[in-house]
Amino acid sequence: MADKGTEPEIKKYKPFQTPKGVHDILPDDYEYHTFLKKVVRHRARQAGFRRISTPIFEYTDLFARSIGEGSDIVSKEMYEFKDKKGRSLTLKPEGTAGVVRSYIQHGMNQLPQPSLLYYFEPHFRYDRPQKGRYRQFWQFGFEVIGESDPALDAQVIQLANKIHGDLGIAELFELQLNTIGTLEARQKYMQTLEDYYVGKERSLCEDCNSRLHKNPLRLLDCKAEDCQILAQLAPVMKDYLDKESIEYHEELISYLDEMGISYTENPKLVRGLDYYSKTVFEFWDKSEGAQNAIGGGGRYDGLVELLGGQPAPAVGYAAGVERLIANMKREKIKVPSKDDLHVFVAQLGTEAKKKCLPLISELHEAGIKAVGALGKGSINIQLRLADKFKVPYAILIGITEVREETAIIRDMSKGIQETVNFDEVAERMVELIGEDNLDLYTPGELVYS
């Protein structure tokens, strides 16, 4: 208890930090997010894709069945929790399973096929945070469900290529391509692969030892040095493929060649999810390889049936948003900013403040991006704030301007100013800024039935 006459002790709180592996998206980075989202949306609409959004969490069994019990994601990386009724739920670690579940649940197989769907959403994995890898991360993805044709695989790859080009980073990456065959052919190869590795356990890393009898395919893409040496000597999948898979892959390659899309055939590429079949592909950094891959995908013809739907072939692609942005920054690529302000409105006195509020609203409706200092600072303090906002123009309203029903427009770079009638301020600002630079919003016209 504080003594009489002394100030009570004020408790000091320690500021919070984000949990490990997650990060805030600050305004400067959101400009990249916004630009990337617009690029994805534009390319998706061109190709006939429609946007879908699935819940942040799903029943755990959805991912266990689709991704595979033996995958790293299911066994080590999922954020799993129980609700108040004891049901096991999981924050979604990837997008395809949820989209396929939605496709089945809402009877999308009754719509014209294939269904072309895309998403742009956050996902969650308990992974070791490192360059471009977070525990909450954003991905966009494309899913083509309801048709099997290598031309569709080629189109999805081309769509990803176009987006990389729009972002200015296509030349940094090369397409790695492989086929892992049908489920039946792959099962035979996996048994051959398991037999090859048995007896070599001492040379395998801890993760690969746990994968050996669950998903031996994953041993081929391990990054540990000893595991890579063994993988180079392992039986090659192509020698075990069925005729259907080989012909499908050869047709896909012919389409890529026709479109001028370069690729590297990589027989060790398998992807980390159990639902893939036939085509698999990734975009690897030309200098850093798989360590800086920005996205990948492939065909998953058995997944719809596996999740309880009528059999429907499918192919998809997903890319990491944070990784794409990191590579854009690495190339010093600047994105257009729509957040730059046009005008700062400064005022002095209560009556001037009353004039400012409707004026700022009028400027907004005219497409002018404007803010105002509605505190009690002097005009000079407010103008210094305008400098920090880097606005090209400032509008000044003081006691004299209120009395004369005028306003002062100042060109901040030239230091010159003019006085205009108050009811002509918005019109004059449109002239100065230029109609091409306005930020106009026209709501869509509603249709009533």
Image: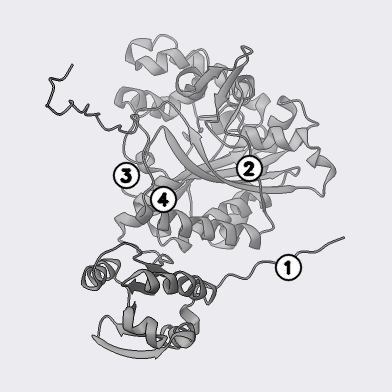
| Outermost front residue | 4
Task: Looking at the image, tell me whether mark 2 or mark 3 is earlier in sequence order.
Answer: 2
Residue 299 lies left or right of residue 285; in this view the side is right
Q: At x 75% / y 28%, what residue is drawn?
A: 305
Report if residue 263 is visible in the image.
yes
Q: At x 62% / y 34%, what residue is drawn?
A: 55
List the residue tagged with mark 1: 445
Q: Front-most of 202 and 315?
A: 315
Task: Looking at the image, tell me whether mark 4 or mark 1 is earlier in sequence order.
Answer: 4
Which residue type carries mark 1? Glu
For discs 3 and 4, the disc positioned in front in the rendered view: 4
Image location (x, y in percent) of residue 59: 63, 22
Which residue type carries mark 4? Leu
For discs 4 and 2, the disc positioned in front in the rendered view: 2
List the residue tagged with mark 3: 288
Report crowding for label 1: few under 14, some 14 to 19, many 20 or more residues within 10 A (C-alpha): few
Image location (x, y in percent) of residue 323: 39, 46
Cα distance, mark 3 to mark 1?
A: 50 Å
Residue 237 appears in which quarter of the rendering? top right
Q: Front-most of 82 and 368?
A: 368
User: Is 209 situated above or below 426?
Assistant: above
List the residue tagged with mark 4: 324
Instruction: Tell me whether circle 3 and circle 4 mark residues in contact (CB < 8 Å).
Output: no
Residue 445 lies left or right of residue 276; in this view the side is right
Element on which disc 1 rests: loop
Image location (x, y in percent) of residue 304: 72, 32
User: Is 197 situated above or below 299?
Assistant: above
For discs 2 and 1, the disc positioned in front in the rendered view: 1
